[in-house]
Image (spheres, helix red, strand yellow):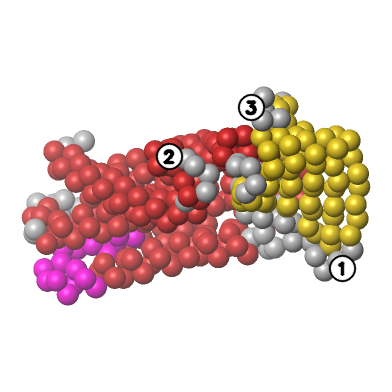
């Protein structure tokens, strides 16, 4: 790598990481507000809230990194053009192929970063987030619940206790669960105790009544019990801890899903769509870089020309990303739609490489 390549790559990477951190911080704040009840209703410290919500950052990076690279590429090219550095490079025989080689190093870094996030770090962060919220829900029951007060644990679940003794025994408990839109369940018991079963927090209820009422039909059924276990791990975002959602699956789980996985048997098309979306995330960085270079392959000597080039490049980048989003949504019902982004990427790369090849031939003819 020559001195010019190192200069461009260093400038590009600095801009990329600044844009990536800025956009990620913005989206993290938006996502973190969804969990603000960890502080307001569940007695968690602010540092605990920040630590837990930071687990979503690897997942955010998978979506933000290609966009951040596109923004930083356009910014760097605009800076080189505004400072007349592109003009000097062009006069010195610095071809667009050479320019692409310098920018490609940053594109490779972004693609490798996305690869790490979609393969392991992103799903791992979401899994840890789920586990931590489940533990907090258990802590709420064991530490935060106050006698003679109704406390909301997770959207749709409310718990009331009459008395909590120093030995951990709870006297008089009501659990109202409205998470299921089809039916509402209410459990009342004379006594309860919190225990650990297979690393999962369980409320063991004694001498109570289980009530189930249909939200539409209004039918009511009641069952008396001597002992009943209420799984607190179900209060995490999603379903049970043992069954991770599609976004929480590692890349190899999507490539080689288990034929006995109940979620895969129900949502095999969603598995396929998620796999293609992650693969596209790794392809976007070099493609976005190529699009930006095509519009800035010739030096711009005025602001209007540079602004027009930025707008046109940004438009094509946005269109390509939109095609990926639409294909991911429609691909669950029509698998052929999942291949549309690859066709679009192929066409863009073909046109870009054709333009670069023609420019190379023109330069060769001019110097001969």
- Give the number of marks: 3
In-image side of 39 versus 107 (left or right):
right
The secondary structure that most of the magenta stretch takes on is helix
Q: Is residue 159 magenta?
A: no
Name the residue rendered at 66%, 35% in the picture.
164
Q: Position of residue 349 (x, y in %)?
A: 41, 57
| Relative horizontal placement of residue 81, taking residue 238 as reference (left or right) | left
Residue on which disc 3 sits: 166
Element type at mark 1: loop
Q: Residues within 10 Å of mark 1 (few under 14, many from 20)?
A: few
Residue 131 makes an appearance in the image: no
- Magenta range is 290-308
Disc 3 to disc 2, how far (Cα)?
A: 24 Å
Q: Considering the image in quadrants, where does the N terminus appear? A: top left
Q: Is residue 186 visible?
A: yes
Query: Label 2: which residue?
Result: 45
């Amino acid at each position: 790598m020559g001195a010019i390549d190192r200069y461009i790559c260093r400038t590009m990477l600095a801009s990329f990481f600044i844009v990536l951190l800025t956009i990620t911080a913005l989206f993290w704040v938006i996502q973190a507000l969804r969990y603000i009840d960890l502080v307001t209703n569940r007695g968690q410290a602010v540092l605990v809230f920040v630590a837990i919500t930071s687990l979503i950052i690897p997942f955010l990076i998978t979506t933000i990194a290609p966009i951040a690279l596109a923004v930083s590429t356009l910014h760097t090219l605009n800076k080189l053009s505004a400072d007349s550095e592109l003009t000097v490079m062009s006069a010195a025989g610095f071809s667009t192929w050479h320019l692409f080689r310098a920018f490609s190093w940053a594109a490779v870094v972004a693609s490798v970063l996305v690869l790490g996030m979609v393969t392991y770090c992103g799903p791992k962060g979401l899994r840890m987030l789920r586990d931590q919220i489940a533990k907090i829900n258990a802590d709420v029951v064991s530490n935060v619940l106050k006698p003679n007060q109704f406390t909301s644990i997770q959207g749709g679940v409310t718990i009331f206790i009459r008395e909590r003794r120093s030995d951990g025994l709870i006297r008089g408990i009501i659990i109202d669960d409205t998470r299921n839109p089809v039916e509402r369940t209410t459990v009342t018991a004379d006594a309860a105790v919190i225990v650990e079963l297979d690393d999962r927090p369980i409320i063991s209820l004694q001498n109570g009544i289980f009530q189930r009422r249909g939200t539409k039909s209004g039918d009511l059924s009641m069952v008396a019990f001597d002992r009943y276990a209420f799984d607190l791990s179900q209060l995490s975002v999603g379903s049970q801890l043992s069954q991770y959602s599609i976004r929480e699956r590692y890349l190899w789980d999507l490539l080689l899903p288990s034929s006995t996985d109940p979620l895969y048997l129900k949502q095999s098309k969603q598995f396929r769509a998620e796999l293609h979306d992650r693969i596209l995330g790794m392809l976007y960085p070099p493609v976005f870089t190529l699009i930006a270079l095509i519009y800035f392959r010739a030096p711009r000597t005025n602001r209007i020309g540079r602004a027009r080039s930025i707008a046109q490049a940004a438009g094509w980048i946005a269109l390509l990303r939109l095609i990926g989003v639409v294909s991911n949504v429609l691909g669950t019902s029509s698998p052929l739609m999942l291949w549309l982004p690859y066709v679009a990427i192929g066409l863009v790369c073909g046109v870009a490489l054709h333009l670069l090849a023609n420019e190379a031939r023109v330069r060769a003819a001019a110097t001969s």
